[in-house]
Image (cartoon, rainbow, N blue to C red):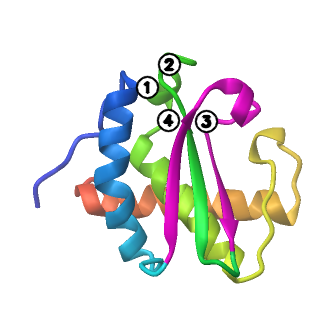
Amino acid sequence: MKVIERPTIKSEAQLRAFVKKWLPWWRDRLGLRDWHIDVEVCGPADLEDAYADCTPQFPKRSARVRFLAPSAREEVWEKYDIEETIVHELLHITFGTAGVGLGDYESGKMSPGVLVEQQINALAQAFVALKRGTWR
């Protein structure tokens, strides 16, 4: 199996191109083929200290996924893997359709929502590692 390296995102154009290529790919593989997903690239004021978020509209089967622009915080896409982030945000739709709440993972407070965030992170990392051939 060919090992695929983690992408480097330095500009908004790179971010948009990567999301345009991989969000539909992951959407289909995660069973969300019938969902319409809009993508926005935002500044830090829009995301309130997050680097991505997802707002699903369950009855409409649509969602908005927002990503922090690389120009807003240069190091953000060096620290976080954009492909894992795509998968993570799409998994929020999957977990949300099952009635599972969200949580504030960064706060460190343990709650059912935080446990869901930890599981979503673990699944996103595992799925991407398997796709890239880097699973150990």
Mark 4 vs mark 3: in front: 3
Which residue corresponds to mark 3? 51
Q: Real-space Cα distance between discs 4 and 1? A: 6 Å
Disc 1 crowd rating (10 Å Cα; few below 14, some 14-19, many 20+) is some
Which residue corresponds to mark 4? 80
The reply to whether the C-beta atoms of the residues labelled 4 and 3 are less than 8 Å apart is yes
Q: Quick check: 85 left or right of 120?
A: left
Q: Real-space Cα distance between discs 4 and 3? A: 9 Å
Q: Real-space Cα distance between discs 1 and 2? A: 5 Å
Which residues are drawn in magenta? 35-57
The reply to whether the C-beta atoms of the residues labelled 4 and 1 are less than 8 Å apart is no
Residue 38, horizontal then vertical, whole percent: 51, 56
Residue 58, horizontal then vertical, whole percent: 69, 77
The amino acid on which the numbered mark 4 sits, given as a three-letter code, is Tyr
Which residue corresponds to mark 2? 75
Disc 4 crowd rating (10 Å Cα; few below 14, some 14-19, many 20+) is few
Q: Tell me which label, 2 or 4, sits earlier in the chain.
A: 2
Q: Tell me which label, 3 or 2, sits earlier in the chain.
A: 3
Q: Real-space Cα distance between discs 3 and 2? A: 11 Å
